[in-house]
Amino acid sequence: MAGDYIPHAYSKFNNWQKQLVKGLLTDPLTGDVTAFPPAPGADPANWEIWKIPQADMQKLVNGQATYQPYYDDWSDEDARNKTIVENHKREYGIYVKLIRKFVARWLRNNGKVKSGSKAGLGLTVPDTKRTSRAKIETRPLVKAEMKGGALLKLQFRVEGDSTRTSMHPDADVVELKYRIGGTEPASPAETNQTDTFSKARYHMQLDMADAGKFFYGFARWKNNTDNSKSGPWSLLIMIMIGN
């Protein structure tokens, strides 16, 4: 499973983590979600069949229960404020760390968990079929929108697709080079931060202390295996950070 199996966008992460926990609690015979902790004599759920200790499963269930109210508060854009943003960011970090540890220990190399089951949990399964990809000749088209709480929403699409966000079929990720404040950079070489993400929609939580400054960035379609096949950089992305 690749290291970026956890979605970066908060809304997508929320849906994904629900899928993960639900899949672990599901009875594979009936397809129903079982109670946790399991009742005496109850049919085993996936986590039991996969020999995951109840204590570790309990930690994941507790982690979800703790995180969910913070996400629910954060998702209300009309009520979102600095405290809600900071609290959600803290709990998100704690929960993601817990999930990564759980996946690494009990799912990554667990021979009882088949590839199809991993895919059903929303985990990335390696593609064993090697295919040759062409050099990417086009740049991504970018839409930037500032949401409440200094949250930057970025959407990308390939040229020729004017109706929806879309990833380039020959790209592994979107690469973003950016900086906060200062004068407009003439090229990606004049930025000082880099991020990559595998989805055409991405939410960046910026620092509210930078409200009033400009976010400057450049994006491109990136081939992780052969950088010479990565595409050209986008036009300058520029938007003022709000609060």
Image (spheres, rainbow, N blue to C red):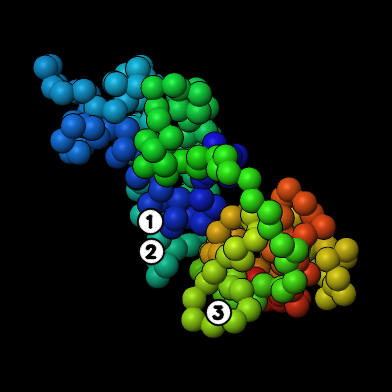
For the residue pair 191 and 168, the one nearer the viewer reads as 168
Question: Which amino acid type is marked by label 1?
Answer: Asp
124 displayed left or right of 208: left
Q: Position of residue 68 (x, y in %)?
A: 36, 46
Give the structural element (helix, strand or loop) at label 2: loop
For disc 1, the neighbor class at 10 Å (few under 14, some 14 to 19, many from 20) is some
- Quarter of the figure that contains the N terminus: top right
Measure how far apart labels 3 and 2 are at the Cα level: 30 Å
Q: Earlier in the sequence, mark 1 or mark 3?
A: 1
Q: Which residue reaches farthest left?
A: 41
Residue at (35% x, 17% y) in the render: 51
The answer to which of 214 and 223 lies nearer the viewer is 223
The x, y position of residue 75, in whole percent, is 40, 60
Can you identify the residue that label 1 sits on?
73
Position of residue 200 relative to residue 117, above or below, is below
Return the x and y of residue 113 as percentages of the image width and height: 39, 27
Horizontal side of 178 relative to 153 (left or right) equals: right
Identify the secondary structure beneath mark 3.
loop
Q: Are marks 1 and 2 in contact (CB under 8 Å)?
A: yes
Q: Which residue is mark 2?
A: 76
From the image, tell me which residue sits under label 3: 161
Work out how far the residue at label 1 is from the one at label 2, CA to CA, in angstroms: 6 Å
Q: Residue at x 49, y 81 (%)?
A: 163
